[in-house]
Amino acid sequence: MRVFYHTLSRMFGLPALGDRQHLWCVARLTALLAPMAMAVGSLVALFLWSLDAATHLRFDHPWLLYLLPLGGAFVGLLYHALGKSVEAGNNLLVDQIHEPGGGVPLRMAPLVLLGTVITHLLGGSAGREGTAVQMGGAMASGAARLFRLDGGCTRVVLMAGIAAGFGAVFGTPLAGAIFALEVLAVGRVEYRGLIPCLIAGLVGDWTCQAWGIHHTVYTIHTGRFEGAGLMLLLGKVALAGVAFGLASLVFAEANHALGGWLKRVVPYGPLRPAIGGVAVIALTWALGTRAYLGLGVWSMIPGDPTITGFFMASPDHWSWLLKLLFTVVTLAAGFKGGEVTPLFFIGAALGHVLAGVLGVPVDVLAGMGFIAVFAGAANTPLACVLMGVELFGAAQVVPMAVACFMAYLCSGHNGIYLSQRIAVTKSGRKPMGTTLREVRGGRRTVMDVMKAMRGEGQG
């Protein structure tokens, strides 16, 4: 019987407890896991339906863009009054999994849902993964409090909530399960919570689909490469992976740098998204296009660059950079949403450009960029390979792996989730357990060096 309890605890990722404690903890975890994932899947279905409706409204009523500063100020005021404890977003979830404390307030879910829908309705360039993951984490934390779970069980439930949200929003339950285990630490996968995360990811995705939600279909038409052709392709994909990793690094660093600068210059939170809204309108006017607003998955305007369009041959050289600019301005200013779908856009657009340079089929390299830029920015290469298999099929799984792991290595000790802890360093000597926030805070910027030099000269 003791072996049975021990096996159950290992399957559910629980710490060492007494026999009765094991049985009671596993029983409560089993009882809440499927209902919690169903609730998350239903909430994600509502979110995706709302997002689609908001996007259609924005195309039907172009004047909504000019309300973006007011919408940003409203969301900022809402978080200033009710959401200061949840402003950290995904980083709060990662912190609570590493060190369970006060939990994740349930109000995170409605706040981030409303904030993200307003962002997309009025034209902000943002994603949806952050919203789904935060709703999943909030629901999971609420369930853990309801069932009075201890710290170890709460940790597992929070990971399962992330898996349910991620799996449901993209229709990739396996990637969702691994993402929840891999996002916690750089270079390590927390396999102890694998079974609960797998169950939650599957149930969340099935529930979302049961509500009639359909996900965009992406297709790589080029067939499997073999022999010398495969080896040549892998070499080219590895070169592209370096570019994908650098794009990840630029995106993450620009987002953190601009966000930090705005917080110093504009201390009052609700004013920052208002300023960001004005900046997005100015960029739109300067470029004469609305193509880089919203998700970028599809567009009602013929000729607009879209994620699906990057899988087909057409001249487009700068969309990846322009989408990066619009998204950084939007998110750094404090608008709600996520980074991942814009990263899909940036990666697919960059792969589209590199395909012509490297002589690789456009759909192949667009697909590699789609997952690899996200892999580098989130430090989750294994989850992104699985996502590629779930979205595109397994024919190109080896190039996918090369692209994702090269991007991961080349993105450095940086990322979109600063609460990630370093388990295995990519290069150099970084203390084990150090967060990316601490690593970034320890760097000397060019401005710091110039100030120090001026100080030395005066002395």
Image (cartoon, grey):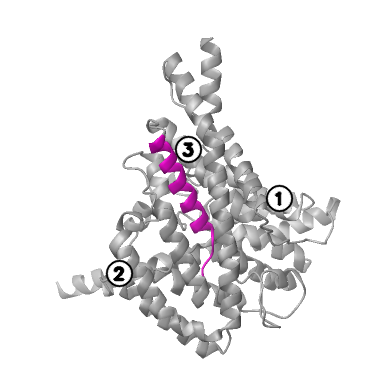
The label nearer to you, 1 versus 3, is 3
Q: Is tag 3's residue or tag 2's residue first in the polypeptide sequence?
A: 3
Q: Please, what is the three-letter code of the amino acid marked with disc 3?
A: Val
Q: Please, what is the three-letter code of the amino acid marked with disc 2?
A: Gly
- Which corner quadrant of the image does residue 454 belong to? bottom left
Type of secondary structure dominating the magenta stretch: helix
Q: Are marks 3 and 2 in contact (CB under 8 Å)?
A: no
Q: In the rendering, which numbered label is found on residue 390?
A: 1
- Which corner quadrant of the image does residue 287 belong to? bottom right
Q: In the image, is 89 to the left or to the right of 457?
A: right
- The residues bearing labels 1 and 2 have C-alpha atoms spaced at a distance of 39 Å
Residue at the spot x=39%, y=40% of the render?
A: 98
Residue beneath disc 3: 157
Residue at the spot x=41%, y=83% of the render?
A: 278
What SS does tag 3 mark?
A: helix
Residue at the spot x=55%, y=56% of the render?
A: 376
Which of 221/373 is in front?
221
- The residues bearing labels 1 and 3 have C-alpha atoms spaced at a distance of 24 Å
Is the residue marked by circle 1 packed among few (<14), some (14-19), or many (20+) residues within 10 Å?
Answer: some
Residue 181 shows up from this direction: no
Q: In the image, is 459 to the left or to the right of 371?
A: left
Q: Is tag 1's residue or tag 3's residue first in the polypeptide sequence?
A: 3
| Quadrant showing the N terminus | top right
Residue beneath disc 2: 269
Q: Are marks 1 and 2 in contact (CB under 8 Å)?
A: no
User: Which residues fall within the magenta stretch?
Assistant: 125-146
The label nearer to you, 1 versus 2, is 2
Q: Position of residue 114 (x, y in %)?
A: 45, 64
Up-down relation of residue 71 to residue 87 (above or below): below
Q: Please, what is the three-letter code of the amino acid marked with disc 1?
A: Glu
Q: Position of residue 79 (x, y in %)?
A: 34, 63
